Amino acid sequence: MSLGLSICWRGPPGAGKRHALQQQLQLWASSFGQHFVLKKQSWDAPLQGGEDTEDAEESSSSESSALLPMEYSILHWGFDVARMSLQDKQFIKSILHRWGRGAQVLSSSGHSKRCLVFYHAHLLSNESVLFLQAFLEQNHEDTVLWMTSEYPLPVRLADWCIEIPVAGPRDKSVEALKLSPEKIHTIEQDIHQIYTAWMNNPAKLSDVKQIRAIVYALLHRNIRWVDGFHHWMFALEALPLTQVQRLRLGDICKQQPFTGSGQTVPSYRIPVLWENYLCQLRDALAPIITEAPPLSTVSKNTKKKKDAVAGRTQHLRGAGRK
C-alpha cells in the first residue's frame, strides 16, 4: 500500500480522532503483512536552543534535556503537542532534526514511506508550523505527516494535508471521567461554578485578586491560551443569559487576539491576556443593580415638596381671611 498523502483528522474534543488515526496505521501495517504494535517510551528531547548533538543523545541526564512521552511502531513516531509545554518549537525542531538523520522506522518492512504523527496539532506555534512546512517540502517523497486537530489547520499545513472530519455526539473522555468513582470535576464544571458565583454577586475590587489566582492556576496546569479561551467561551452556553448579556459576551470573545490555530503568543503577554479576558467576562456577568438616587437629589426633591405644601397652605390661609 503506497501512501503519499498527509492527513489531518479534525473534530471536537473526545470525538475519536486519535483512535481513527491509529486504526489507519493498523490497516497500513496489515496491507504488507506486518503486525502493528504500539509502543510507548520517554523521548529525551534537548531544549537549549533546540540543538541536537551526539553528546546530548549520549547524556540522557543532561540538564538541558527534558523527557517527552512518545509512541512508536514500525510505521511511525507519534508525539502530543499538548505535552510539549509552551516550548513546542524547540521540541519540533529537535524531532525533525533527529528524524532527518535517517531513522528508517520502516527499514525492516522494505517500504520507504515513513509517518510522523502529531496529536493536538492546533496547538502548534507559528514557528513550529514553519518548521513543518519546510520539512514537508524537503521530505514529502518518503515521509507523510498525520495529525489530529480540533480547529482548521494553518494554510501552510492545510495545503499539504487532506482533511477527514470526525464527528462525535459527545466528548468520550469527559464521559469516562463522569463515570469514574472518584467524582473528578471536569474543567467545564469548574468554570461553570465560577460563572455561577459571578452571576449571583455584584462585581467588587477583590475579584481581581481571585481572577489572578485563577490565571496562576491555568498557567500552572500548562493550559494553552487558545485551548483555555475556548473552554471559557463554550462554558457560557450553559448559563441562563439574557439577550443583552449574550451580545455583550459575544463582543468580548470576538475582540480577543491569538484565538486561531498556528498562532504564536509571546509568553509575557499570556498572563495579561488571561487577566483581561476574565475581568471582562466577570464584569459582563455581574448582576445589574439599579442605583439609588444620590442623597443630595433626594433632599432637594423633599425640600421642593415641603416648599410647595407650605406655599399652598399660606394661599389657603390668605383666602380664608378674605
Image (tube, rainbow, N blue to C red):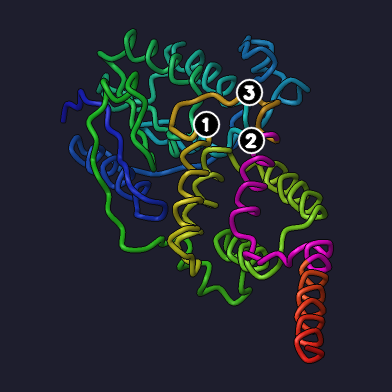
Q: Is residue 185 visible?
A: no
Tell me which label, 3 or 1, sits earlier in the chain.
1
Q: CA distance from mark 1 to mark 2?
A: 8 Å
Residue 281 lies left or right of residue 105; in this view the side is right
Q: What is the x, y in percent for residue 203?
A: 72, 58
Please, what is the three-letter code of the amino acid marked with disc 3? Pro
The tag on residue 273 is: 2
Which region is colored magenta?
A: 272-300
The answer to which image quadrant residue 108 occupies is: top left
Q: Secondary structure at mark 2?
A: helix
> Which of the two discs, 3 and 1, sits closer to the camera?
1
> Which of the two discs, 3 and 2, sits closer to the camera?
2
Q: What is the x, y in percent for residue 142?
A: 28, 16
Residue 128 lies left or right of residue 84; in this view the side is left
Q: What is the x, y in percent for residue 161?
A: 26, 27
Q: Secondary structure at mark 3?
A: loop
> In this orientation, which residue lies closer to the viewer: 312 or 78?
312
The answer to which image quadrant residue 298 occupies is: bottom right
Decide whether the magenta segment is chiefly helix, strand or loop: helix
Please, is residue 32 above or below residue 310 in the view?
above
Q: Are marks 3 and 1 in contact (CB under 8 Å)?
A: no
Which image quadrant: the N terminus? Answer: top left
The tag on residue 266 is: 3
In the rendered image, which residue does mark 1 sit on? Answer: 257
Q: CA distance from mark 3 to mark 2?
A: 10 Å
